[in-house]
Image (spheres, rainbow, N blue to C red):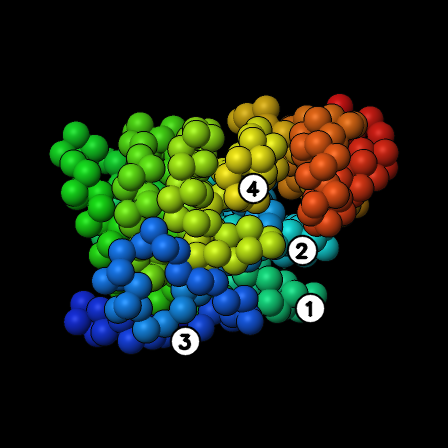
Amino acid sequence: MSCSDVTDIPSPAEQKDRASTGRPLPANESSYQPQLSETFSAATASDQEIPRHSLKPGIYVPTLAFFNKESEALDVDTIAKHAVRMAEAGVAGILTQGTNGEAAHLSRTERKVVTKTTRDALNDAGYTDLPIVVGCGAQSTRESIEICYEAQSSGGDFAIILPPSYYKEQYRREELRQFFTDIADASPIPILLYNYPAVAAGIDLDSDMIVDLAQHPNIVGCKLTCGNTGKLNRIAAGTRAATPHDPASGFLCLGGSADFTLQALIGGRVRSHLRPGQRHAQGLRPTVRPLPDRGDGGGEEAAGGCRSGRLDRDPERHHGDQESAAAFPWLRRIRAQAAATADAAGDGVE
Ligand SMILES: N[C@@H](CC=O)C(=O)O
């Protein structure tokens, strides 16, 4: 499977013009109409000619990249099956090339293949409206923008961007702010800020910077995998982040790991990004069911990244209290699925 190369990246002037005068809506654009936050500056609000193109609150899954065990080539069949499995579980969206998606190990061509495979599989299964967020971070502004274009042409709806970190010692706040602002000005798809110091040489965006950057109309959310729920709460309050019941500013403030889903639910006006587990980490595997064995052992192997995790048979322990479940029907559904999965999986799940 291949994807067309990006040949036509607009000039910086054209990019700026596009960002300020509107752009094609993402495929998943709906009647969801957020209001601007009152914490945003008057100048920003009154200059804004287009509504924020927002993601809906919900559970978003950073999906795994699957590889053929022998050749290390992408296992597109499993990538496709897994995407549909996640959609069937009721997620609000899928993230390709997050950390579990091993963006750092993929070539630019492979990144496009993963996203296009995911989009095509979702479309074929009828999930044409399910948004795909694509990891588009790179060390240079220019390459990040190019990857945003490639993400869009591969079927991605949103981009999520890590700060650059190779020259960490040289970056001050202002350079980091400029990096995100320049990408947001130029990207053809809205972006989310990705704060994960563990994979960014310790760079830890603070809440002031994130709230400030959130004023940009093309920056529509953040994902905090730093695990700092105090920061998450400050950002949610400072941006008047969206909830399932109140689109508010439309800014989406996501917890980046299942470990603090409950804290995110309680305090952050947010829904969480779940981490389905990684080969190299003992992550939780709260809603992921092993893929069916393909008969040649490949399915089992391919699902290895998910199988290494641990699932408590009592989903309450990982998904919050009864009150949260009553308030959020999607949470109830996911809990029921997690319980059913645990029962069905038998000894496959600890
Ligand atoms: N589950 C996350 C982990 C860090 O944010 C991801 O894979 O992106």
Pointer 1 or 3: first along the chain: 3
Closer to the chain start, of discs 1 and 4, is 1
Question: Where's residue 143, x and y in %?
Answer: 26, 55
**Residue 126: numbered disc:** 1
Could you tell which of marks 3 and 2 lies nearer the N-terminus?
Answer: 3
Verify CB contact (< 8 Å) between mark 4 and mark 3: no
Q: Is mark 2 within 8 Å of ligand 1?
A: no
For image coordinates 16% across by 36% down, the residue present is 172
Query: In the rendered structure, are the residues bearing label 1 and label 2 in contact, judged by CB atoms less than 8 Å apart?
Result: no
Spot occupied by residue 335 in the image (x, y as percentages of width and height): 75, 40
The residue that appears at 23% across and 74% down in the rendered structure is 17
In-image side of 138 versus 98 (left or right): left
**Amino acid type of the residue that numbered disc 3 sits on in the rendered structure:** Pro
Q: Characterize the local packing of mark 4: few (<14), some (14-19) or many (20 or more) Cα atoms within 10 angstroms.
A: many
Residue under label 3: 24
Which is more toward the observer, 295 or 240?
240
The first of marks 4 and 3 along the sequence is 3
Distance between the Cα atoms at labels 1 and 3? 22 Å
Occupied quadrant, residue 337: top right
Upstream in sequence: badge 1 or badge 2: 2
Q: Residues within 10 Å of mark 1 (few under 14, many from 20)?
A: few
Task: Kindly check if marks 2 and 4 are in contact, taking CB atoms under 8 A apart as contact.
Answer: no
Name the secondary structure under disc 3: loop
Q: Quadrant of the C terminus?
A: top right
Observer-side mark, 1 or 4, equals 4
| Label annotation for residue 87 | 2
